[in-house]
């Protein structure tokens, strides 16, 4: 279902979706552009329920690129714009998927149930830091399964100067972390064990259990890339597998974990993903 199309603005707030959807797709078109821009679009998603006057933040403002990589785990991939070596211009489009519905099946990126939406209960979407020269389309994916549960994303930070921090899992299900900043993760499981995972094995695990993260494609779904080595017909196809920047871990078996890093030069962000009822618990479970 196409929700809206956007062009010529740097931001658009209060995009509303009333039909039950479980995923949001953002298609970014590069047609007519002479080069790729440097914009990193941001999205924020709230669930507004007019029946009780509530407004709950499902996705705090964050880059589409982060949510897009999460959506690529552990099957499928996210499409990226191609670069035509003949014309030197970008072609095709960039796809960003935002998973919002409760998981149907197993795994982080499996099928999403639709959120229980109506004329009184709807998604309110903000898009910011857009390239005014590009066209953006917002799509919603419906599902025959409608659930009173919804996926929420929460941001946490390790401040500059902090080398270690303990995170409590509480009711959260998934931990998303920047792999390049990891020294090691020490997990404290509910069964009393405390395994330690170093960066190298976390990378190997992502490579081994995840397929493609993103693939660069042209407007006709063909793989095209940048000519290198000054040899006609020799084309480099940008394909990422395993992970791009983010690791995704199921933490339902743990009570807490320690994140340790080599240096504290910068502040870094983490995410926790949880599935919560959109109705009072007694109603949602009935």
Image (spheres, grey):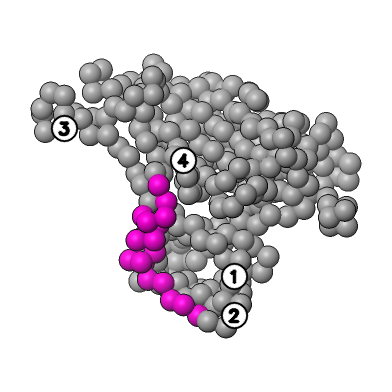
Of pointers 3 and 4, the one earlier in the residue sequence:
4
Of pointers 3 and 2, the one earlier in the residue sequence:
2
User: Which residue is identified by label 4?
Assistant: 76
Contact between labelled residues 3 and 1, with CB atoms less than 8 Å apart: no
Q: Residue at point 87% right, 53% down?
A: 286
Residue at mark 1 to residue at mark 3: CA–CA distance: 47 Å
Contact between labelled residues 2 and 3, with CB atoms less than 8 Å apart: no
Of pointers 1 and 4, the one earlier in the residue sequence:
4
User: Which residue is identified by label 3?
Assistant: 228
Q: Residue at point 53% right, 81% down?
A: 193
In magenta segment, residue 213: no
User: Which residue is identified by label 1?
Assistant: 253
Q: Is residue 84 above or below residue 165?
A: above
Judge whether residue 131 can be spotted in this image: no
User: Helix, strand or loop at disc 3?
Assistant: loop
Q: Nearer the viewer, mark 1 or mark 3?
A: 1
* Image coordinates for residue 115, horizontal then vertical, percent: 73, 41
* Image coordinates for residue 32, horizontal then vertical, percent: 39, 16
Read off the magenta span.
194-211
Q: Mark on residue 221?
A: none
Number of marks in picture: 4
Contact between labelled residues 4 and 3, with CB atoms less than 8 Å apart: no
Left or right: where 56 falls relative to 238:
right
User: Helix, strand or loop at disc 4?
Assistant: loop
User: Which residue is identified by label 2?
Assistant: 191
Residue at mark 4 to residue at mark 2: CA–CA distance: 33 Å
Left or right: where 30 falls relative to 270:
left
Contact between labelled residues 2 and 1, with CB atoms less than 8 Å apart: yes
């Amino acid at each position: 279902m196409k929700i809206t199309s956007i062009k010529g603005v740097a931001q658009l707030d209060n995009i509303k979706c009333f039909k039950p959807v479980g995923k949001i797709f953002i298609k970014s078109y590069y047609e007519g552009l002479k080069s790729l821009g440097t914009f990193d679009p941001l999205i924020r998603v709230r669930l507004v329920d007019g029946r009780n006057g509530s407004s709950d933040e499902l996705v705090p403002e964050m880059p589409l690129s982060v949510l897009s990589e999460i959506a690529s785990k552990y099957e499928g991939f996210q499409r990226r714009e191609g670069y035509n070596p003949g014309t030197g211009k970008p072609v095709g489009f960039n796809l960003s998927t935002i998973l919002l519905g409760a998981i149907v099946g197993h795994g982080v990126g499996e099928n999403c149930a639709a959120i229980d939406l109506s004329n009184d209960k709807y998604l309110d979407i903000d898009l910011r830091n857009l390239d005014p020269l590009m066209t953006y389309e917002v799509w919603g994916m419906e599902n025959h399964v409608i659930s009173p549960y919804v996926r929420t994303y929460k941001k946490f930070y390790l401040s500059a100067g902090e080398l270690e921090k303990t995170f409590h899992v509480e009711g959260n299900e998934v931990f998303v972390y920047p792999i390049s900043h990891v020294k090691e993760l020490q997990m404290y499981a509910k069964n009393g064990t405390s395994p330690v995972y170093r960066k190298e094995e976390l990378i190997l695990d992502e490579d081994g259990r995840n397929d493609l993260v993103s693939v660069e494609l042209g407007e006709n779904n063909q793989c095209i890339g940048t000519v290198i080595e000054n040899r006609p017909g020799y084309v480099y196809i940008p394909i990422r597998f395993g992970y791009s920047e983010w690791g995704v871990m199921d933490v339902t078996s743990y009570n807490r974990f320690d994140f340790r890093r080599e240096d504290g030069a910068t502040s870094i962000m983490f995410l926790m993903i949880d599935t919560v009822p959109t109705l009072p618990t007694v109603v949602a479970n009935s």
